[in-house]
Image (cartoon, rainbow, N blue to C red):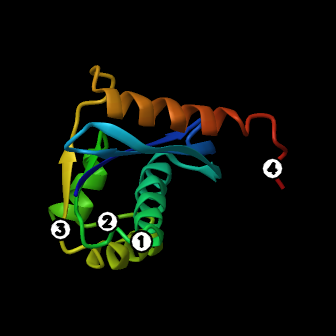
Amino acid sequence: MVIEIYIDGSSKGNPGPGGAGIVIVDASTQEVLRAQGIPLGSVTNNQAEFLALKHALTGLTRQGLVGDQIKVLTDSQLVVGIFSQNWKARANLELVMEIRQLVKEFPQLTFAYVRGHNGNPGNEMADSLAQEAAESQKGIKRQ
């Protein structure tokens, strides 16, 4: 099976309440297999984008889909650059290292950049899930 994963991260305040949006699609039928918004606590925009990828990959591992052909689609050029074009990470190094280890477990993983807010249904859904997850934490008192 060829799987497309749309990911997006959102932070209200940068840093502030953040959310990750993940949409997993069967590429042959365009059927949405899973759509999920994950509240992330207080994060930056970049951390939210990275955490969306981390949650997507760990979810695939749990579902036993490591060997499938997987295409990650994101509107984050930073995610595409760091995890597929050998860009050097300048921040969030621990998180980046953790995700690089996860990426190694997927032999057929590719990344593609999609322009955000451009009518791509998978990207739009991931964006709104991330926004909702971030909004759900507004007003939560931070320690």
Q: Which mark is residue 61?
A: 1
Q: Which mark is residue 89?
A: 2
Image point (39%, 69%), residue name: 96
Q: Nearer the viewer, mark 3 or mark 2?
A: 3
Between 7 and 59, the residue placed more toward the observer is 59
Of marks 3 and 1, which one's residue comes earlier in the chain? 1
Q: Where does residue 7 sit, x and y in percent of width and height?
A: 39, 46
Q: Helix, strand, or loop for circle 3?
A: loop
Whether label 2 touches label 1, CB < 8 Å: no
Image point (19%, 74%), residue name: 107
Q: Where does residue 110 sit, x and y in percent of width and height?
A: 18, 59
Separation (CA) of disc 2 from disc 1: 24 Å
Of marks 4 and 1, which one's residue comes earlier in the chain? 1
Q: Helix, strand, or loop for circle 1?
A: helix
Kind of residue sitting beneath label 3: Gln
- Tell me the crowding category of disc 2: few under 14, some 14 to 19, or many 20 or more residues within 10 angstroms, Cα based: some
Between 81 and 35, the residue placed more toward the observer is 35
Q: Helix, strand, or loop for circle 4?
A: loop
Between 142 and 117, the residue placed more toward the observer is 117
Would you name the residue on which mark 4 appears? Answer: 142
Of marks 2 and 1, which one's residue comes earlier in the chain? 1
Single out the residue that lies furthest toward the left.
85
- Tell me the crowding category of disc 3: few under 14, some 14 to 19, or many 20 or more residues within 10 angstroms, Cα based: some
Kind of residue sitting beneath label 4: Arg
Q: Helix, strand, or loop for circle 2?
A: loop
Please state, as top left, top right, bottom left or bottom right, where the C terminus lies in the image.
bottom right
Would you name the residue on which mark 3 appears? Answer: 108
Relative horizontal placement of residue 62, taking residue 134 as reference (left or right): left
Separation (CA) of disc 3 from disc 1: 13 Å
Of marks 2 and 4, which one's residue comes earlier in the chain? 2
